[in-house]
Amino acid sequence: MSRITLITYFDEKQLDIINKILRNINFKMCKVPYGINDNKRYEIDNLPYHFTIFATDKINQDKLLNITKNIKMDKIKLKVNKVTIGNLKNDSFIVYFGIEDNYFMKNLQRNFYEIIPEEKYNPDKFNFHMTIHIDKNFNIVNNLFGMIQLEFKPFYIEFNKLALYDYPGEMIETIEF
């Protein structure tokens, strides 16, 4: 079954903040997890740096968009306070940015979780993260982690738009709140 994902959508100024931290990385990184289309992971990696808010089956697209269009809130400001390595399914590893606990992010996610209750996106348990790279080779992930740590200082990033994507695939729509 086809999936859709709703993500934070950062403007160029915000993406520049992230890219400055990653400027010394001299190899192509990939945010697509293994198990989707392993031979074409790099080719289908078209989502910008983001935090996932919610993902669900494509059959819920209209419901998801209706929820999104009814959200009334201001810009959300996040404190990105760590870079971390984690284990993923399919014997792979991830390096990602994490955020300080944020009421507004959880509340945003709760709007979707209450109507489409997918446990993976329960805001009381969800780990908001910005994927930097996924790889099966731990040494690559660990070396990347070390390079990022050299440049990393906690930083703030903000957004007032969400984007809905076919996953993996093309952008369906952006929604400003």
Image (cartoon, grey):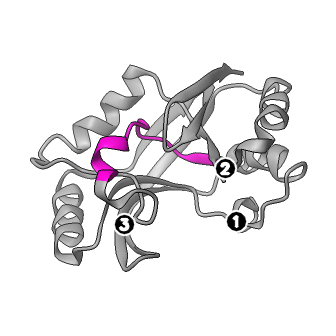
Distance, label 3 to label 1, CA atoms, is 18 Å
**Amino acid type, residue under disc 1 in the picture:** Lys
**Amino acid type, residue under disc 2 in the picture:** Ala
Distance, label 2 to label 3, CA atoms, is 19 Å
How far across and down, in percent of the image, does residue 110 sit?
Answer: 81, 50
Above-or-below relation of 90 to 80: below
Could you say whether the residue bearing mark 2 is in a helix, strand or loop? Answer: strand
Residue where numbered disc 2 is placed: 55
**Amino acid type, residue under disc 3 in the picture:** Ile
Residue where numbered disc 3 is placed: 94
Residue where numbered disc 1 is placed: 120
Circles 2 and 3: CB atoms closer than 8 Å: no
Check residue 3 for magenta coloring.
Answer: no
Quadrant location of the N terminus in the rendered image: bottom right
Could you say whether the residue bearing mark 3 is in a helix, strand or loop? Answer: strand
Q: Quadrant of residue 177?
A: top right
Above-or-below relation of 139 to 97: below
First to last magenta residue range: 40-53
